Amino acid sequence: MIREGDFGKLLEDQFLSMLAYVAAQERLKNKQRQSEGIEVAKAAGVKFGRPKQEITPDFVRVYDKWKSGVIKAVEAMEELGMKNRTFYRRVKEYEHQQQVG
């Protein structure tokens, strides 16, 4: 025998389950639309993320000073306006270019 309080709880649980299902379906639709939009943008040539800091002649000049011991790495980073991870990533890239080319 179902009491009136139990029936109200049952209806409440069913309603909340339905709302959770609707919310989950909406998230899936949004994610699908987002991925479709990203694919369209990539096909159109849109670049995502931060622009890459290229190896410039200024970088090469500061790199040479750093490698010869005239300045420390921290001074080179400050002069170039780079964070340490970016600086060392560009150093690795530049040294690889020197070995290959």
Image (spheres, rainbow, N blue to C red):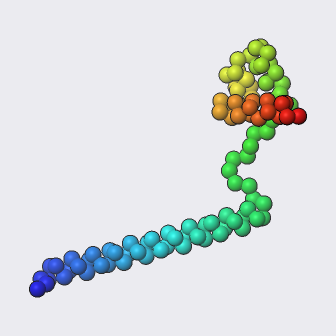
Quadrant of residue 40 in the image? Answer: bottom right
| Image spot of residue 35 (x, y percent) | 62, 66
Quadrant of residue 44 in the image? Answer: bottom right
Asked whether, in this view, residue 37 is left or right of residue 91, the answer is left
Asked whether, in this view, residue 50 is left or right of residue 23, the answer is right
Depicted 30 relative to depicted 70: above or below? below
| Image spot of residue 19 (x, y percent) | 38, 75
Residue drawn at (70%, 21%), measured in percent from left and top?
73
Asked whether, in this view, residue 15 is left or right of residue 25, the answer is left
Q: Quadrant of the N terminus?
A: bottom left
Residue farthest along the right direction in this orientation:
101
| Image spot of residue 14 (x, y percent) | 30, 79
Depicted 98 relative to depicted 70: above or below? below
Compare residues 80 and 39 and report the one nearer the observer.
Answer: 39
Residue drawn at (45%, 71%), measured in percent from left and top?
24
Depicted 94 relative to depicted 64: above or below? below
Residue drawn at (43%, 76%), measured in percent from left and top?
22
Number of residue marks: 0
Quadrant of residue 5 in the image? Answer: bottom left
Residue drawn at (79%, 33%), measured in percent from left and top?
96
Q: Quadrant of the C terminus?
A: top right
Residue farthest along the front direction in this orientation:
100
Depicted 90 relative to depicted 32: above or below? above
Asked whether, in this view, residue 6 is left or right of residue 14, the answer is left
Residue farthest along the bottom direction in this orientation:
1
| Image spot of residue 97 (x, y percent) | 83, 34
User: Would residue 58 be visible to someone looking at this image?
Assistant: no
